[in-house]
Amino acid sequence: MTKLVLAGTIRADIGMPLGIEILLAGKSALDAIEETIKIIEDNEDDWTVGTGGLPNLLGEVELDASIMDGTTLRAGAVASIKNYKNPISIARKVMENTPHVLLVGEGAEQFAKVMGFEQVELLTENARDMHKDFLDGKGITKKPYDTEKSFKAKERYFKSFQDMVQNAKLMDWYRDYVANNHGTVNVLAKDKDKNICCGVSTSGLSFKFPGRAGDSPIIGAGNYADSRYGAAACVGMGELVIRLSLARIAVYELSKGATVEEAAINAVKSMKDLSPDKGSVSIMVMDKEGNVTAACNWKNYYYWIATSDEPIPQKKECIFVDLALEDVDGVGYHR
Ligand code: ASP
C-alpha cells in the first residue's frame, strides 16, 4: 500500500491531525492540504497567517496563498487579498474554476465574492493594537489576550520592525531581517494515488507595503509540486526566494536524482548566490517516495510529519545550513 504522508511547517501541527485523517480516509492530497491549512488560517494565535495575521502598513490584513497539484501541474494562487479568511480555498478555486493561476488584490476579492466566500474582518484586536503601537513607534506592550508563547514570538518579531521605523531605513531593516522573523505555513502531502501536492499560506511580511506579494503565491518560488519527483515549499524572505525560484529548482534537483537532503541543503546554500543580499530562508522538500526533510539557515527550527505508519504528527528538526562557512561558497544551484 502507498505510504501516506503529510508534512507541515512549525505551526502546522494544529491542523495536521485532520489532514492525515483525510488521507487515511482515502481522500486526496489536495483535500488534506486545504483542510489542514484552513485550521491554521483560522488560528487567531498564529500572527503569520489568516485571521490574526499582522497587517500591512495601512493596518489592513493582506493574505497570500497558493496550491499546486503535482499530478496535473495545475496551480492556483491569490495575492494581497483582504477580508477573506481562507485564501487557500480561494487559491484552490482559482486552480479548479478559472483558466488562471494567480489573481491579485481587488480581482481576487471579486472572484472570492462571486464564488460565494463570506467576507470577514481579519484584523484581530491584538493585531490592531500591535499595528497602532508600531505606528506610534512604541515597544510592544503585553495585552491581556496574549498567551505567554504568542507574546514572546511577537515581541521578537516586533523588534525588527520597530528598528525599521525608528531608523527609517527599509533596506537596512530588510537586510537585517534574518533570524527569527518568519511566518508562512507550508503543507506537503502524498495520497493513496501517489499524488503529491503542496499548499502555502501567509499574511506575508508584517507591516509590509500595501500590495507587496512575497514568494508564497508565486508558483515555482514559494511552492512547487510534480508527482513524478516530489514537492517543495518555502518560508522566509520572499524576495530572495522569488529571485532564486527556489521551490522549482529543488524539485528539478529531485528529478535529477538528488535526495531530499541534497535538494533542501543545496537550495539553502544557493542563497550565497545573492550575496551581499542575505536573509533567512527555509525549504521543506518531499520526494516521490514520501521522504521529507527541511533545511534552513538558522538554528532551532522545526517541521512536522505524519504518515500512515505514524499518524500522530512527529516534530523534526530542520537541517541547519551555516552560510558563514567557507565551503558553502560555490555550491548553490546557480553557479
Ligand atoms: N515568505 C513570506 C513572505 O515573504 C514570509 C515568511 O515566510 O516569513 O511573504
Image (cartoon, helix red, strand yellow):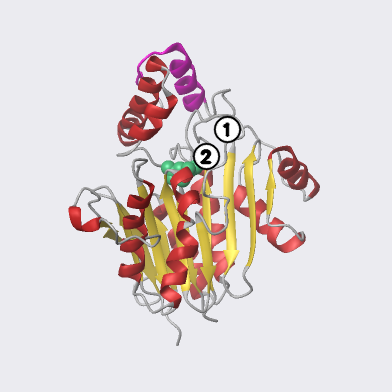
Residue 125 in the image: x percent, y percent? 51, 24
Image vertical order of residue 209 relative to residue 258, above or below: above
* Mark 1, secondary structure of its residue: loop
Q: Quadrant of residue 255?
A: bottom left
Amino acid at the residue labelled 1: Val
Query: Is 289 or 312 nearer to us in this picture?
Result: 289
Q: Residue furthest right?
A: 114
Disc 2 residue lies near ligand 1 with CB under 8 A: yes
For the N terminus, which image quadrant? bottom left
Residue extent of the magenta highlight: 125-144
Which residue is drawn at the image coordinates 58% and 72% (left, top)?
28
Q: Residues within 10 Å of mark 2 (few under 14, many from 20)?
A: many
Residue 80 in the image: x percent, y percent? 62, 39
> In this rendering, would 330 be left or right of 289?
left
Q: Earlier in the sequence, mark 1 or mark 2?
A: 1
* Mark 2, secondary structure of its residue: loop
> In this rendering, would 8 be left or right of 200?
left
Residue that carries the numbered disc 1 in the rendered image: 61
Asked if labels 2 and 1 touch by Cβ distance under 8 angstroms, the answer is yes
- Judge whether residue 164 is colored magenta: no
Can residue 183 be seen in this snapshot?
Answer: no
Q: CA distance from mark 1 to mark 2?
A: 7 Å
Residue 264 in the image: x percent, y percent? 35, 63
Residue that carries the numbered disc 2 in the rendered image: 203
